[in-house]
Image (cartoon, rainbow, N blue to C red):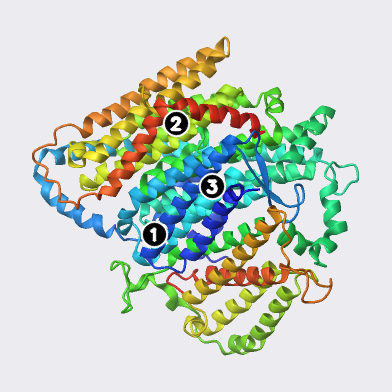
Amino acid sequence: MSKKRSDWESRPQARIKKWFFDGYSAFDDEIINQISVKTPDPVNHAVYDAYIDEISANKHERKLMIEKFEDQNVRSWINARGRKVFTRFYVILSFLLACLMIFFLLRTVAEMPRFGSETSPGINEVTARYIEKGLDETGAMNIVAGMILDYRAFDTLGESTVLFIAASAVLILLRIDRNKDGSPVMELIAEESDDRHYEPRNDRILQGAAKVLVPIIFLFGIYIILNGHLSPGGGFSGGAIISAGLILYLDSFGFEKAGRFFTYSTFSWVSFISLSFYALAKTYSFYMGANGMESGIPLGTPGAILSSGLILPLNIAVGMVVACTMYIFYALFRKGGL
Amino acid sequence: MSIVHNFPFFSILLCMSAGILTSMLNHRAAKWVTFFVSGAVLVMSIFTLNLTTSLENSYSFMMGHFPAPWGNEIRIGRLEALAATGFSAVLFLSVIAGFYHSPTFVSEQKTNLYCIMIDLALAAVLVLIYTNDLFTVYVFIEIMTIASCALVLVRQNGHTLVAITRYMIMHLFGSGLLLLGISMLYGITGHLLMEPLHDTIQGLVEKGQYTDPLVVVIALITAGLGIKSAMFPFHGWAPDTYAFAPPVSSALLSGIIGKSYIFILIKFYYRVIGIDFIISQDMTFYLFYCGIAGMMVGSIFAIFQRDIRRMVAYSSVAQIGYIYMGIGMGTAAGVEAAVFQMLVHSVVKSLLFLSTHELVNVSGDRKRFHFLHGAGYRNVPAGIAFTFASLSMVGIPFTGGFIVKLNLAIAGMNFVGTMRALVLIALAVSTLLNAVYFLHTVVSIYRKPPADIVYPEKEKMPRYVAAALGVSALLIFLLGVVSEPVMKIIEKGLQTFA
């Protein structure tokens, strides 16, 4: 005998069924309910209220009423039948479109040159030079590091900036600003919207394991960053590992303890220093390169830890940005702050 | 190589460093930095434009120590410099005219984050204009997508959050299609830089190899960039996003960010693939018909809007239709007209969004038309600016919009039969539709305000905002009166573009 589960409504099957039969309107309402921060504009709201009082007895109110009535007439039809008809049609159409796209893309892939085949036009002088001369020109044993941080360093500057701007965007959305005395800036954001107090309770086993693991994880991440030009690895992967260590610490000890060494200003200082170092170093190097001058940065002996010119410091910079950003993403899953 | 040759590179790196620096500043300093950076970029772009018009051909600038197919590269010509000048001027004016509203939509603590988004959006726009490398295009389109999401969601209410959710889903889908197209192209050719790509593709086309994958690549990239620039069947995200975003953000989103995607599309068609192959596969005509459909549908929807900002947003869909119609003609004259429309529309649309916000602001933050009666008297400069921009939208002589329509009509006369008829009829009908809703709005902001409404005392608009709106209107006038030199730059630029 099966028990009927109480959370049936929130299960994926139920949600898919709901979506299929009610269409995306159901999702629209859900999104509005979930994400709307109930704060009217602080300035506009007062004005608006004043208006409602002022105009309640004039003809503009009548105009508004008429508009509202028309709106309701249209809406009632839309809600009763229109949306259902439309969304059925919509679901079928999107299914067909997806099938069509899958078919065409698979057909295209079948016609593309085989990956790695010698006759493919994709095998050309670009890859040949990366493989043959990469070590001499960049000084990096790891060809990938040489490619992303020397041959195509501008793209990588863009990529690190993507991480930085994504973290800033998340901060705009989810950080709760406070005045100097600790009260939230927008009064209507009540304390309960700060959901950091849902953080995990003290778990002895987790804390014990974290005490052992976190330093090892940090060491491993630092090794991967510093060795990025010699072996597989580099700033992006090493930074991700360090941030995993930070996240483990946060999960086991909570925001208060993590806040002792990682706050918003840590984030901004670390990303500011590393990104501006990257930008300045590369401005110098690009400027010299484009104007046909020697940059004078020694490449060193390939294989030594201090070699391959700017790649090692750039790896460190990228690693720091990645670590901070990943940590910020995780920390802000709980709305509030760092 | 003189120092001026380096200016495009300097302006890109300046914007990126400013974005990074702004995260450390307080709100006042952040605004000043953004202001100065956009001004500096404008000045440097003017110098670059001056330099490139004196050069016979465009020049490449190596981003690093490694030459063309191995390292990154940017390429600077007249068309690029003209676009950079126009877009940075629009950004500079929007920042001046819109920033003083910022306390109403973003808190002081987050103003510096907002300024980061503006700086990095400008950096991305510049990179998309100048770059000569397809992968760089993708990376900076990512930056632009995130920046434009954040530009809208600084004002956190239900409307913007729903609008931005839709915006983000559509734009990520567009980025996905674009990435798929770029990686397929890389799989076929093994190049990412534009000139080697072009040579390889020419070789493949001559041998008749891989024609179908190439067609799919063109379709994917066109659809991806079409979604991102609000081309007609993919315009669903545009009205809500433009209507509910803060004024500066709407001006930037529709004024320059949407246009730079189209600029990349032109670059892809002319420099990467070669327009002859695209025409031989009959692919430009889809753009042509989408453009015409957009001109009609956008205007018709705009007529039925009751909210002035949504009306302006829908007219944006119609105006993007003009650009795609020009590109879809596939002739040099058509693309020249499209590029000119890009410049004119970016000035006009940002001016419309900014002045609309001022008009709504003096009418007590209500956007319905019957509350806007008399708004043109309550804020005289904004009313004049709005009227002038509307006239340009309709296409009255002495405005940029008139020259656009004239050029498009001339480009259409090069065809015979159905195409010619379609272009002329579309232009005539869309002009009429534009006149219906824009002139109606202009009349309604100058109607006598009803006696029983008391409008609240607003603090007066600062003089410099009026000056910025005035300069924008002057630009529209200049584009309408002395369009000849600009058209010459575009014509010569397109020849050296590919």
Query: Callout 1, which amino acid?
Result: Lys
Q: Quadrant of the C terminus of chain B?
A: top right
Spot the residue most to the right: A118
Question: What x and y, as percent, mark residue B171?
Answer: 54, 47
- Residue identifier under label 1: B31
Q: Does residue B383 lie above or below A46 as drawn?
A: above
Image-quadrant location for residue A138: bottom right
Vertical side of B214 occupied by A24: above or below? below
Answer few, some or many: residues within 10 Å of disc 2's Cα (few below 14, many 20 plus, some between 14 and 19). Answer: many
> Please, what secondary structure does the residue beneath circle 3 have?
helix
Hey, which quadrant is residue B414 in on the image? top right
Q: Secondary structure at mark 2?
A: helix
On screen, A25 above or below B492?
Answer: below
Q: For residue A267, say whether it is visible.
A: yes
Residue labelled with disc 3: B125
Q: Earlier in the sequence, mark 1 or mark 3?
A: 1
Left or right of B213, for residue B221:
left
Q: Identify which residue, B291 or B301, lies in the foreground.
A: B291
> How many angstroms separate mark 2 from mark 3 (CA)?
20 Å
Q: Which mark is residue B319?
A: 2
Measuring from the top left, give residue B77's x and y in whole percent: 61, 38
Name the subunit of mark 1: B
Q: Residue furthest front?
A: B2
